[in-house]
Image: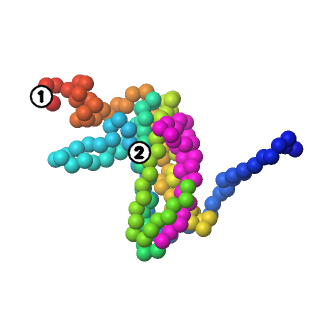
Amino acid sequence: KAASDVILFHKQVQEATGDIQKSVLLINQSFFARDDRYRYENNEQFDKFVTKEFEKGRVYGCQLVLTNPTSTRRTVDVLQQIPAGAIPVLSGMQTKSRHALLEPYSTQSQEYYFYFPTEGEFPHYPVHVAQHEQVVAAAEPFVFKVVAEVDEIDKDSWEHVSQFGTDQQ
């Protein structure tokens, strides 16, 4: 029994049902290093997504892109979370659920950031999208391989050239 006025809020995550295969929504989830996000070719900027090894202690971002390629407005719930073993940074979150209104033929994007304090392999529960409490889209599951130091160094990146490059580079 409370000694004074109190407000109690309860939130619960339950297993969702639905047929993701029949979804008309498109979803993409990609990961990038915050300090080395782009590559440039012929004065054009391209995303540099990380898909193999992730470095312990380095800040990474996740880019979520939701697309409604139909003529119907969609009101959806988006469930997203950082990978297991990761720590949120830059006003990030562990788990977040949000409502989104996808207008016809529209795209929305969102980013969040995290880092891994230790090495290892960490699974990631991918972003899931539900409509009317039914799962309608989900990104592919991913396992992060976190190492002390990344083997593949981008020798064309400004970060590398500015510190280790030759005069010619």
Q: Tag 1: residue type?
A: Gln
Q: Secondary structure at mark 2?
A: strand
Mark 1 neighbour class, 10 Å CA radius: few under 14, some 14 to 19, many 20 or more:
few
Magenta residue span: 73-97
Q: Which corner quadrant holds the N terminus?
A: top right
CA–CA distance in space, label 1 to label 2: 32 Å
Which sits in the foreground, 98 or 53? Answer: 98
- Whether residue 136 is visible here, answered yes or no, is no
Horizontal side of 79 relative to 14 (left or right) equals left
Residue at the limit of the structure toward the left, as seen here: 168
* Quarter assignment of residue 162: top left
Disc number at residue 90?
Answer: none
Percent position of residue 52, x then y: 39, 40
Could you tell me which residue is drawn at 57 percent across and 42 percent down?
94
Say which residue appears at 30% left-offset and 32% top-offset.
153
- Color encoding of the figure: rainbow
Position of residue 64 in the picture relative to residue 130 (left or right): left
- Residue occupying the point 65% across, 57% down: 15
Q: Amino acid at mark 2?
A: Phe
Q: Which mark is residue 31?
A: 2
Examine the rendered structure and indicate whether residue 106 appears above or below residue 127: below
The stretch drawn in magenta includes residue 85: yes
Horizontal and vertical percent position of residue 138: 51, 58
In the rendering, at what x and y percent does residue 96 appear?
57, 49
The residue at which mark 1 appears reads as: 168
Q: Please say whether residue 96 is one of the residues in the magenta stretch.
A: yes
| Mark nearer the N terminus (1 vs 2) | 2
Horizontal relation, residue 47 to residue 66: left or right = left
Residue 7: tell me if it is visible: yes
Residue at the spot 78% in from the left edge and 46% down from the top edge:
6
